[in-house]
Image (tube, helix red, strand yellow):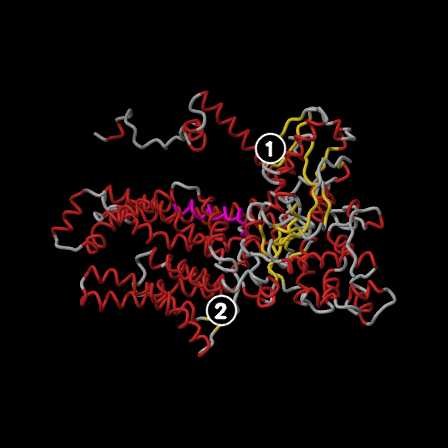
Amino acid sequence: MKKSVILGALTVAGLAAGAASAATLDDVRARGKLNCGVTTGLTGFAAPDANGVWEGFDVGMCRAVAAAVLGDATAVEFVPTTGQTRFTALASGEVDMLARNTTWTFSRDVDLKFEFTGVNYYDGQGFIVPRSLGVSSAKDLDGATVCIQTGTTTELNLADFFRANNISYEPVPIETNAEGQQLYLAGSCDTYTTDASGLAATRATFENPGDHVILPEIISKEPLGPLVRHGDNEWGDIVRWTLNALVTAEELGVTSANVAELAAGPTGNPEVNRLLGTEGELGAMLGLEADWAVKAIAAGGNYGELFETNIGENTPIGLARGLNAQWTEGGLIYSPPFR
Amino acid sequence: MSTTDLSYVRTEMLPQQEPPLAEKGVFKWMRENLFSSWINGLLTIASLVVIYVVISTLAPWLLNSVWDANSLTECRDILAEQGLDSHGGACFAVLGDRWHQLVFGYYPSELYWRPALALVIFLAGLAPVLFTGLPRKMLILTALVPFVAFWLLWGGSIWLPVSVALGFVVGFLALKFLTPIVGTLAGTILIFVLPILYWLFVAGPLASGLASAVPIEIQFVESRAFGGFMLSAVIGLSAIVLSLPLGILLALARQSNLPIIKYSSVTFIEVIRGIPLIVWLFTAQLLLNYFLPPGTNFDLTLRVIIMVTFFSSAYIAEVIRGGLAALPKGQYEGADSLGLNYWQSMQLIVLPQALKISIPGIVNTFIGLFKDTTLVVFIGLFDPLGIASAVRATTDWNGVYWELFIFIGLMFFIACFSMGRYSLFLEKKLQREHR
């Protein structure tokens, strides 16, 4: 009986295989839903709320793409993936895009045959220490015990950093962020190291967040961004330019509050007009409606709004814009022009 | 001579004296059981100290627990108002806020009655199997349960489970009418081949045809919405129900005289059993995705159920093989000498005894299997532990650990303990040797 289910599935799969995989955009449209790979839960970036509705910074990216393509920000099927299953889920077509705070690296881009469509968060590995330790720089951590997640790039970065500075440390291996948090609070390690955004989110949950400091040194580059499969450049363009639209919207002052008004008719700023589809044919070039960017921005706001609602300084996580400020304000967030 | 002269003879019984204080009641019990020697006395005192320390730490934490709050910060504020620090009391409010996710996952909340009803029907269908006192007619209900439960859980058109169930009817008809005509061997092959052909080529069109002719359907729920204990129960119970018959078949096949059957069974059991379950789960999640053509949507939960079933059936097969091996050879020979054919002798003589011997091992495997369902968290399914991390991933509840783990542990304990108790009950009831 079970054999027959597998055989049946194989048969069905064989028939379906011809149609699938060619044009992701057509698949998404036919399905009426965007399959978006997210984490199984990361504070501020993606997590289901009490009603099971996904929320977060990465989730906002998925919703913007769904809004741009399908005109409906809720037409997203969130596929939770773990660190091990995320790339297979994307490669096998289980998800159309991955917005799972994944670091853009050479091998992932080239060897795993994915296409990173931009960077939506510049992260980097940092250290958190109790204020009582009296440490003000990571270079003072000579001989410290460090809680570190095993099998991650953070482990390698840590070794590199300490060797480069010619100081020693004693690793306390942990499996998950939850474990690291517990061990650090229990005093089993002097410092806990992981991505700075993760440290901020972790610190926000402490009873007295003020008793802990995140050290200024950022010892690695972790550009996080959405990614798609190789081989469907049209789809990659849609995801890339949706992200760029959100960034440009912030730069041009287009927000979810005023986007409907600005899109009602041509404004004095030609780039706003091109972005919002009241001038030019940019939407049609992507194979989308003219107002694709309007819908994407209306879904969750522009890049800055997404940042502020989910991880910004007014949230419990309280991340400063830092590197993730617009290029006009000293950050790295920069979109090519809409032209 | 009157008895009164015998002044030295007692005329009435003395009233019974109380035994000495040290020889009665709680003191005697304590002296005999707790302080019978100095080393026992030391151990008793040491144990009391440990018990006191545990209780005095845990009791305030449990007694001061907060049951009504919307976030961990709120919990801490309430505790602070009572002059306690954050470790002074548990924050069970997280259960009040999120219990529905821990139990049902992301199943639509207006449809919670469906999994609940499915569980009731499942237990009702299981009852005649578990308790032989119930009327045998109820077994008909048992046969229908998998299909009704499937329909309730996933929803959609009623004709899909109906047309799949018809496959078994096809097999039954083949057994009833074809076997007498074509003979046992050809009949046995047909019993398996006809339903499979039916499922492959007839069931699908039949279901969609009926669905368009007589649309009876309830809201379809994707298996991605399944989570929490409901997911554990769906995976665990389906695997338990499916793996027992499969395990029995494998055990019998392993003892077969026919080399092909025997060696395919041995290979299956050894391969499945020789590789950890987590690897099989990754295979289900990752490798199958590469083998199946892109765009295929072969339900992940179904893949996991199949893998877990295979895994536990390999273990069950070995447990039952132990039972078969424990039967004296005379039982097999006796069955043969009665002129019973293979299936009759297995069904009437061998298996009832072998299964009875295997009960503790079988239940042991099932308990292990049920707890192993938590491994699916590693392939991105939301089992109770996965839900717990997802709950912690919200800013409201980030930092809540013990309260969630205690709840999850308690639920698993209840399920596994009941299974263990049932196995003891069954063993007692089936005890034949010493009465």
Relative vertical location of residue B46 with respect to residue A300 in this rendering, above or below: above
Relative to A250, B4 lies left or right: left
What residue range appears in magenta? B365-381
Relative to A267, B129 lies left or right: left
Which residue bears the numbered disc 2? B156
Quadrant holding the N terminus of chain A = bottom left
Relative vertical location of residue B388 with respect to residue A158 in this rendering, above or below: below
Q: Position of residue B154 (x, y in %)?
A: 49, 64
Relative to B8, B162 lies left or right: right
Q: Nearer the viewer, residue A32 or A12?
A: A12
Q: Position of residue A212 (x, y in %)?
A: 75, 36
Q: Are marks 2 and 1 in contact (CB under 8 Å)?
A: no
Amino acid identity at mark 1: Pro
Chain letter of the residue carrying label 1: A
Is A325 inside the magenta-drawn segment? no
User: Which residue does the image show at 42% across and 62% down from the upper left?
Assistant: A11
Q: Nearer the viewer, residue B166 or A13?
A: A13
On the question of residue A318 being in view, the answer is: yes
Q: Nearer the viewer, residue A131 or A226?
A: A226
Is B371 inside the magenta-drawn segment? yes
Residue A173, label in figure: 1
Q: In terms of image quadrants, where is residue A36?
A: bottom right
Tell me which secondary structure the magenta stretch mostly adopts. helix
Relative to A239, B125 lies left or right: left
